[in-house]
Image (cartoon, grey):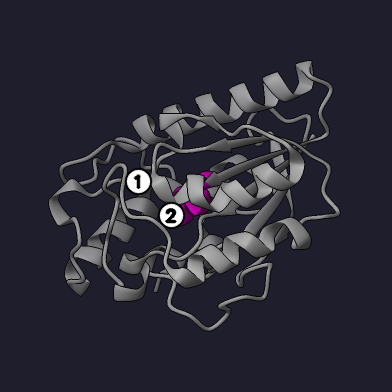
Amino acid sequence: MRLLLIRHGQTQPNVDEVIDTRIPGPALTTLGALQAAALPETLSGEDIGALWVSSMVRTHHTADPLAEAYGLVPAQRHGLHEIQAPDWELSGNPEHIDVYYDVVQSWAHGELERRMPGGETGHEFFTRFDAVIDEAVRTGRQDGLSVVAVVAHGTAIRCWTARRTDNLDAATLEQRPLDNTGVVVLEETAEAAHPWTCRSWTGVPVSGVGVHAPSGPAGEPIC
């Protein structure tokens, strides 16, 4: 099975370069809507049989054009939401952003007991994200699907793939950006520890729309 992990389109907090992990959060900007609208054409080679979204508005709006193109009804699961930073919502303070990504990096390196200030531990993050991916893949397999698409969030996708793929790790992902509507293509492996292999990773929108537009801290390399 192929798993497409799609980051949502641009939001105003992305433009403002602030941390925004509120639920349900903001809608897409005008550019973000254009990015989402371009996804059906740029993913036309993928036989997408199911769409999954988080409980955050921006993933729904990003998935809408794909849902219409493929005749699908997206399944919403709360467990796909972004890694939250309740203590620093809408903060653009570089110190807050640095600590946020220091925690995320520590999870990618296996320090799962560490807690995000005001938020979850790495164990809690991987447990909730794994559960939805497992459900999506299991359901897709039962329905005879070959491709499942998940519209989620930049930091969550980057951290999760660092520990769940056999050819990516924390060191490489620290400098691997994922802009709005960037797509990560994974395929299943036979390994229990690393059940996926990454076939492609794009640091720019696959649509080509808004390549140089701000995509917020979640899309930038971790320095």
Residue 9 located left or right of residue 146:
left
Examine the rendering and report whether any part of residue 221 can be seen. no
In the image, farthest residue toward the top: 142
Residue 143 located left or right of residue 151:
right
Mark 2 neighbour density, 10 Å: few (under 14) some (14–19) many (20 or more): many
Secondary element under disc 1, as helix, strand or loop, is loop
Q: Residue at x 54, y 53 (%)?
A: 62
Which portion, as a residue range, is magenta? 152-160
- Among numbered discs 2 and 1, the one appearing first in the sequence: 1
Q: Residue at x 66, y 42 (%)?
A: 67
Q: Nearer the viewer, residue 198 or 112?
A: 198
Q: Nearer the viewer, residue 17 or 56?
A: 56
User: Is 35 located above or below residue 49 in the figure?
Assistant: below
Separation (CA) of disc 2 from disc 1: 7 Å
Q: Amino acid at mark 1?
A: Ile
Q: Residue at x 39, y 64 (%)?
A: 11
Percent across and percent down for residue 181 are: 58, 61
Secondary element under disc 2, as helix, strand or loop, is helix
The residue singled out by tag 2 in the image is 155
In the image, farthest residue toward the bottom: 212
Examine the rendering and report whether any part of residue 19 can be seen. yes
The residue singled out by tag 1 in the image is 83
Percent across and percent down for residue 190 are: 78, 29
Magenta region includes residue 56? no
